Amino acid sequence: MRFLKTITMSAALAVAASAAIADKLPLGNISSYLNGLTTAKGEFTQINGDGTISTGTIYIKRPGRVRFEYNAPDTGLVVAGSNTVVIYDTKSNQPPETYPLARTPLSIILAKDVNLGQARMVTGHTFDGTATTVTAQDPENPQYGNIQMKFTGPQPELRQWIINDGNGGQTTVVLGDLQKGGNLPNRLFDVGSPGSNNR
């Protein structure tokens, strides 16, 4: 009986392992999902490198545009558009911080054509029984850092990302349910206008 039980348990573990492998989302499916994510809006929670937590609303308009509006008491606003990322502190007299979008790992999922099958782009592709995690970088500029994206399935849904920037900083963004589709006005992504009254 012990031998039979061992065989049965081994078979059950083998089936479970096969199911886990089958549930790992292929990179091609994830690329197609991201390419189909033209517009989206939803709530997010951000865990900063110093452990502080912020919340707000994210607007995505691919390719190349995203907007993070932070809830009070935070006074920040991050807008990406026109190949530029601008970080505003709406209550500060200091000028906004500006970076080329191409130098941030977020550009990978905002690209016009996401292709995670590109050589040297994906450095990690794992499944933990619940979610598929993909770590990707700019294959031509790995010094810009990477983005670690978490998807649930069987149809891919982006749930979280962690940005590891080229300076050793780390920022985690946990997404609520995204409302996909619909029209988002281009003024939301105007990097020259920090106003948050366009919701």
Image: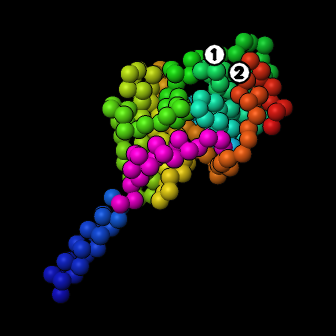
Q: Is residue 13 left or right of residue 2?
A: right
Q: Is residue 120 visible?
A: yes
Depth check: give the residue in front, 131 or 23.
23
- Magenta segment: 22-40
Give x and y (percent) for residue 52.
63, 35
Work out whether 168 lies above or below 34. above
- Is residue 23 one of those drawn in magenta? yes
Kind of residue sitting beneath label 2: Val
Of badges 1 and 2, the one in the foreground is 2
Q: Which residue is rendered at x = 52% and y = 21% of the image?
A: 102
Residue type pointed to by label 1: Thr
**Left or right of 20 on screen, residue 54:** right
Q: Main secondary structure of the magenta part?
A: helix
- Is disc 1 in contact with disc 2, using a CB cutoff of under 8 Å? yes
Residue under label 1, please give it: 98
Q: Residue 191 carries which label?
A: 2
First in sequence: mark 1 vs mark 2: 1
- Report whether residue 74 is seen: no
On the image, which quarter does residue 119 sit in? top left
Disc 2 element? loop
